């Protein structure tokens, strides 16, 4: 299967939305295309994220990753949080996730960011193997915490 990865624009909204909704469902959220559409449209409208989109030769969306800008005050640098990575079930095991991760790294380099970070479930061993095969390193210096509001 041949595919391309490119940066999505607002004109790709109809392609990105079902993938984003699939991503949310993968993480236990109910299907909600209207909510997914509103969320992604707002990211595009306010230029709050970068979405990289994998497409087959016919223009069908195969997967995406979404990058959010972060800043390090201590290092005085910009970073990206790779918050979302999803490949449609029918398109898995074809190198699309690896291509999206490589495209994210390439985009980060082109934008001059200091690095990318991501989080994954402790038991998501397949994803961990993929990340590590592409040079991602688990953080051994800091423990991540969250506060639900």
Image (cartoon, grey):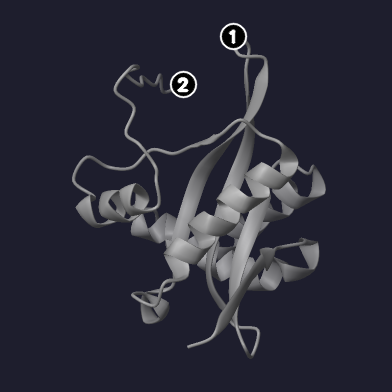
Q: Nearer the viewer, residue 107 or 62?
A: 107
Per the image, label 2 sits on a secondary structure element best described as: loop
**Callout 1: helix, strand or loop?**
loop
Q: Earlier in the sequence, mark 1 or mark 2?
A: 1
Q: Nearer the viewer, residue 143 or 35?
A: 143
Residue 13 shows in the view: yes
Q: Position of residue 46 (x, y in %)?
A: 80, 42
In the picture, measured across the screen, residue 92 lies left or right of residue 57, that is left
Instruction: Say if 77 sits above or below 16 in the image.
Output: above
Instruction: Estimate the x, y position of residue 59 in percent, counting from the top left.
Output: 65, 84
Give me the disc on residue 65.
none
**Coordinates of residue 122 in the picture (x, y in percent):** 22, 40
Q: Is residue 49 above or below residue 53?
A: above
Residue at position x 72%, y 55% in the image: 41
Tell me what residue is drawn at x 77 percent, y 62 percent: 9
Could one spot residue 28 in this view of the protein? no
On screen, residue 105 versus residue 28, left or right, reads right
**Front: mark 1 or 2:** 1
**CA gap, disc 1 to disc 2?**
26 Å
1 displayed left or right of 7: left
Q: Residue at x 71, y 63 (%)?
A: 8
**Foreground of the two, 146 or 94:** 94
Q: Label 1: which residue?
A: 74
Mark 2 Cα-neighbour bin, 10 Å: few <14, some 14–19, many ≥20 = few
Position of residue 130 measured from the top left corner of the image (x, y, whole percent): 33, 56
- Where is mark 2, residue-wise? 149
């Amino acid at each position: 299967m041949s595919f391309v990865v490119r940066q999505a624009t607002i004109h790709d909204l109809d392609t990105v939305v079902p993938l984003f909704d699939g991503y949310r469902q993968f993480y236990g959220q109910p299907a909600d295309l209207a909510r997914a559409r509103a969320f992604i449209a707002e990211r595009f409208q306010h230029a709050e994220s970068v979405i990289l989109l994998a497409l087959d030769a016919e223009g069908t969306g195969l997967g995406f990753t979404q990058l959010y800008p972060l800043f390090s005050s201590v290092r005085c640098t910009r970073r990206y949080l790779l918050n979302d990575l999803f490949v449609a079930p029918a398109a898995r095991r074809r190198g699309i996730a690896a291509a999206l991760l490589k495209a994210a790294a390439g985009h980060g380099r082109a934008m001059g960011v200091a690095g990318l970070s991501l989080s994954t479930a402790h038991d998501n061993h397949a994803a961990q193997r993929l990340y590590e095969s592409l040079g991602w390193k688990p953080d051994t210096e800091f423990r991540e915490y969250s506060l639900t509001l």
